[in-house]
Amino acid sequence: MWEEKDDKLNRAFTFKDFSEAFAFMTRVALAAEKMDHHPTWDNEWNKVNISLSTHSAGGKVTEKDRELAEKIDNILKS
Ligand SMILES: C[C@H](O)[C@H](O)[C@H]1CNC2=NC(N)=NC(=O)C2=N1
């Protein structure tokens, strides 16, 4: 689940393999681009760590981050 810490919303995801992880990242990237709101993330093989904050709000968590987090959760479920 998402955890709010140090002005960021963080969540770690683990997939079966790299293909699954990267497919998820592609879908998140398209949703993020549509919102013009982008994650800070890293990927190592089957793991993806996502961190959300709003640069234009001085790096704080805003409604935009909560909205993107919800979209990411929906991508994961679908
Ligand atoms: C110019 C462009 O709209 C801005 O830089 C957008 C792009 N993506 C962004 N992503 C995030 N996470 N925060 C922002 O403030 C932000 N701003």
Image (tube, rainbow, N blue to C red):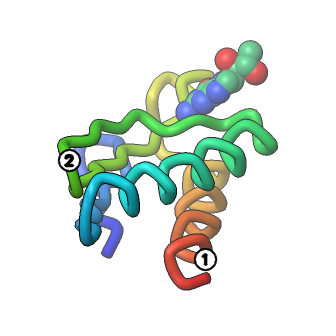
Residue at the (23%, 56%) spot, across then down:
46
- Quarter of the image for residue 44 reads top left
Specify the quadrant that holds the N terminus. bottom left
| Disc with the residue nearer the chain's start (1 vs 2) | 2
- At label 2, the amino acid type is Trp
> Residue 77: x percent and y percent?
54, 84
59 relative position to 7: left or right: right
Mark 1 neighbour class, 10 Å CA radius: few under 14, some 14 to 19, many 20 or more: few
Helix, strand or loop status at disc 1: helix
In the image, residue 7 lies at what x, y percent? 34, 42
Q: How many marks?
A: 2
Residue that lies at the very extreme toward the right in this rendered image: 34
Q: Is residue 63 left or right of residue 4?
A: right
Residue at image mark 1: 74
Q: Which amino acid does label 1 sit on?
A: Asn
**Quadrant observed for ligand 1 in the rendered image:** top right
Residue drawn at the location 70% of the way across and 51% of the way down: 31
Image-based side of 26 in relation to 21, left or right: right
User: Is 11 placed above or below 5 here?
Assistant: below
Which quadrant: the C terminus? bottom right
21 vs 51, nearest the viewer? 21
Q: Is residue 55 above or below residue 68?
A: above
Q: How far apart are marks 1 and 2 (CA)?
A: 22 Å
Residue in front for this viewpoint, 57 or 78:
78
Q: Mark 2 points at which residue?
A: 45
**Which one is closest to the eye, mark 1 or mark 2?**
2
**Disc 1 residue: CB within 8 Å of ligand 1:** no
Near-viewer residue (14 or 40): 14
Q: How crowded is mark 2: few (under 14 residues within 10 Å), some or many (20 or more)?
A: some
For the residues labelled 1 and 2, say whether their Cβ atoms are less than 8 Å apart: no
**Mark 2 secondary-structure assignment:** loop
Residue 57: numbered disc: none
